[in-house]
Image (cartoon, rainbow, N blue to C red):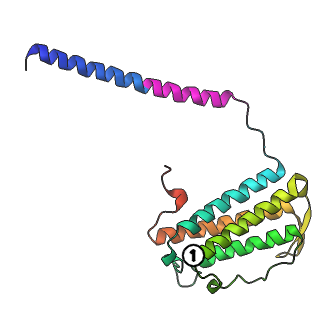
Amino acid sequence: MKPVKMHALKMNCLRLLVATIFAAGVLVTSAHSQDMQKQNAAPKPAPSASEAVLEQWNDIGRKLIAMAEDFPEDKYSYKPAPTIGTFAQRLIHAAHANEFFINAVRGEKMPAMDDPKPETFKTKADVVAYVKKSFADGAAAIKAKGDKGMSDIVVDPFGNEQTRISDFAYGFVEHSGEIYGQLTVYYRVAGMVPPESRPKK
């Protein structure tokens, strides 16, 4: 290769390198600037009592609904071990448990203690609808009570003791979280990745 062409090639490479470093610097500076703006901005105000409860209720509801919709229908009868319930049964249990919270907050009669039989639900869509309804009804009950209502007293049917609605709600959120944790194991043992663990688009 001639010296002139070699020199031109080196100059082009040098220009490309400088441009790349400059672009990277701009991106880093922009990201740093955005971080500084967030740090210097006024902190987001704390949610109200009912907003805090509703946020937690809806978040775990979103996760369980995503699993219910995502898991293949032909695997709804799957169980990682013979001694535990199927994927469908765990979802049904979570939704049925929510009814105790909903009915207590509404002042309605408690549901039957036993979960509905799996055969009550003919299809995956039926189970998904049941799970969705339980979280939607729970959210509606929380909204109807509002901030002041979070301190209202209801009777916990499992412990036969009085409890504030906010504390009662958090107990069901925790219960749903436990079911969520169990179902992540169903996913993994079945060779699948839970929706929350997949790379974000």
Residue 75: where, in percent of width, then height? 50, 76
Q: Is residue 118 above or below residue 27?
A: below
Quadrant of the snapshot with the N terminus: top left
Is residue 32 located in the magenta-colored stretch of the structure? Answer: yes
Tell me if I can see residue 170 in this picture. no
Q: Amino acid at mark 1?
A: Lys
Q: Where does residue 67 sit, x and y in percent of width and height?
A: 57, 66
Query: Which residue is depicted at the point 59% across and 70% down?
Result: 182
Q: Which residues are magenta?
A: 25-43
Q: Give residue 169's quadrant in the image.
A: bottom right
Verify whether residue 144 appears in magenta.
no
User: What residue is shown at x 62% (from left), y 65% (from top)?
Assistant: 64
Q: Which residue is mark 1?
A: 124
State whether residue 7 appears in this view: yes
Residue 189 coordinates in the image, percent (x, y): 47, 71
User: Left of 28 or right of it: where is 109?
Assistant: right
> In the image, is residue 150 above or below residue 82?
above
Residue at x 87% of width, y 58% of height: 145
x, y percentage for residue 131? 67, 70
